[in-house]
Amino acid sequence: MKALSPMIALMVVVFLAVPAMGGDSSPIKRILYEDAIDDEIAQSRQLASLLTSRSENLRQKGHREASKAMFLETHREKLVSEMMAVNLEPKTYKVERFLNERFTCTCYATWAAR
């Protein structure tokens, strides 16, 4: 058991040192981006339940969120590639803003026409 503690400490140091030394953190970023998209899809699906609301505004919000979930699922790989290309910092608020901007730019014409 005592030999395990130094081993864990060494693994943590190596894990933190590799990105600091300029190692390729692309796979880690890709996973973080994919997880963020999954979280955003889950949130949008949850808000899509507003489709059954009595309020017209909430039904529109539910429809918009259902559309957003579908957009994110459909364009998931493209969005991850775009985030990788611009080297987006994998912080939650930055990824959410990026996804919202892409959804708005792509789907705004549809919503504005209504």
Image (cartoon, rainbow, N blue to C red):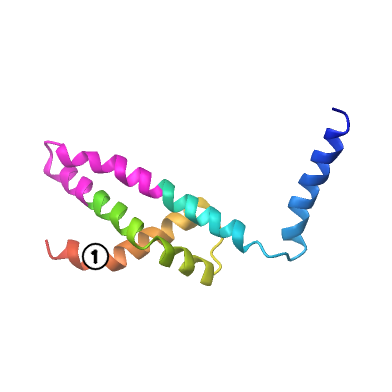
Q: Name the image quarter holding the C terminus.
A: bottom left
Magenta segment includes 108: no
- Residues 32 and 100: in front is 32
Residue sticking out furthest to the top: 1
On screen, residue 112 above or below 64: below
Residue 72 falls in which quadrant of the image? bottom left
Residue 11 pos. (x, y %)? 78, 46
- Indicate the amino acid at tag 1: Tyr
User: Which residue is found at the position 32% from the left and 46% from the top?
Assistant: 44
What residue is drawn where x is 56% and y is 60%? 89
Image location of residue 81, percent across then percent down: 48, 68
Drawn side of residue 66 relative to residue 86, left or right: left
- Is disc 1 surrounded by few (<14), some (14 to 19) or many (20+) residues within 10 Å? few
Q: Nearer the viewer, residue 23 or 105?
A: 23
Q: Under tag 1, what secondary structure?
A: helix
Instruction: Please state if 57 lies on the left or on the right of 75 as rendered.
Output: left
Quick one: 92 or 35, which is closer to the camera? 35
**Extent of the magenta region:** 40-63
Image spot of residue 86 (x, y percent) = 52, 71
Q: Is residue 42 left or right of residue 110?
A: right
Q: Which image quadrant for residue 106?
A: bottom left
Q: Residue at x 54, y 54 (%)?
A: 31
How far across and how far down the image is residue 73, in percent? 35, 56
State the predominant SS element of the stretch in magenta: helix
Residue appearing at x 47%, y 63% in the figure: 80
Mark 1 lies on residue: 108
Q: Is residue 23 above or below residue 54?
A: below
